Image (cartoon, rainbow, N blue to C red):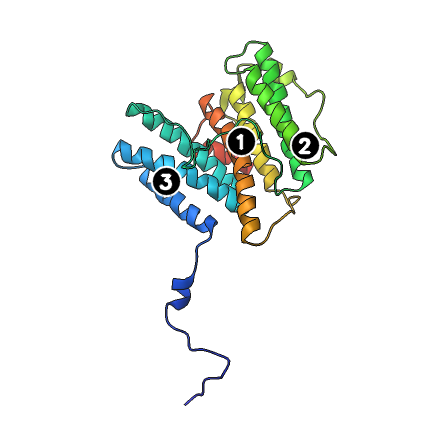
Amino acid sequence: MTATTACSSPRIAGRAESEYQETDCERSYRSATDNDSRAQHGPIIVRYLASSQSAQDWQTVAAACPQRISEGVIRSAQAQWLANNLAQSISQTYTASAHDGNALRRQRLDGLTALPLSKAILRKLALAEDRAGSALQVLAAKGVAGATLTASDNHHAAGSQLMSIAGNTGDLRQKEYEISNLLANPSTATDQSTGLQASTVSIIEIDCALEELAALASPDNTVSNTGATAASTRTNQMLVLVRLITGHCYEAFEQGYPSADFAVFASSSKQ
């Protein structure tokens, strides 16, 4: 008979499994994928409620799972777009808000004073916002449908807010951007990532979102937090940024950019 050493305890079958606690990342991912499945089939009201919940779940995935931020943002925008379309078919209004009342889409970063990101990443995000704002400003001046000075101002403001968080050093924003292609194709253009024809405004918005997601996936993003409190703070801060980028994706869909996987994920893979 083999003796049991004094410093070890016999393993109780199933104990480790029963004591395992899911992380916010794992829990949200499971809920998001489950609700995605429910949103595809069944009564419209069930699909509407499932897509509405999925939109929130995917944002938590994006904020709590750094390796899934692109997937989370794009899937949330897709789920919100689906929920909005389903709501119209049952005479409802989709409000795009979380259970806590916060909007799932933002146009600026008002109130945000910190992000768990390196300054190099923050500068790249600010550049993407500023470039989009300048492009929309040009199109708004030409009276292009869907391009407004308000949207331009919001992009510029978000860029300034990101640079403020970065300490206003090493600014990558430019006074002028190349606009010859923009002037030649003010209404519709070819998306360089996919070869698809879409409205120029929609391409500006999706390019801004995907440029930001590419920056967030960069190895330059070296800042990390540890511990339960730090993880919670990080998730809450990232949720604000996630909702800004989700807003750009959703706006692209509203302006006519395809919301299907073949378009948005093909574009994101080429960033």
Identify the mark nearer the N-term, 3 or 2: 3
Question: Hey, which quadrant is residue 80 in on the image?
Answer: top left
Left or right: where 17 falls relative to 41: right
Q: Residue furthest bottom?
A: 1
Q: CA distance from mark 3 to mark 2?
A: 37 Å
Identify the mark nearer the N-term, 1 or 2: 2
Q: CA distance from mark 1 to mark 2?
A: 16 Å
Q: Position of residue 27 (x, y in %)?
A: 42, 49
Question: Hey, which quadrant is residue 82 in on the image?
Answer: top left
Of 38 and 118, nearer the camera is 118
For disc 2, the marked residue is 164
Q: Residue furthest left?
A: 43
Q: Residue at x 55, y 40 (%)?
A: 238
Q: In the picture, which quadrant includes the N terminus?
A: bottom left
Mark 3, secondary structure of its residue: helix
Q: Position of residue 125 (x, y in %)?
A: 63, 33
Mark 2, secondary structure of its residue: helix
Left or right: where 22 falls relative to 177: left
Q: Is residue 271 visible?
A: no
Left or right: where 15 falls relative to 228: left
Instruction: Tell me, for residue 244, which label it has, or none.
Output: 1
For disc 3, the marked residue is 36
Q: Position of residue 25 (x, y in %)?
A: 47, 49
Q: Amino acid at mark 2?
A: Ser
User: 79 above or below 252?
Assistant: below
Q: In the picture, which quadrant includes the C terminus?
A: top right
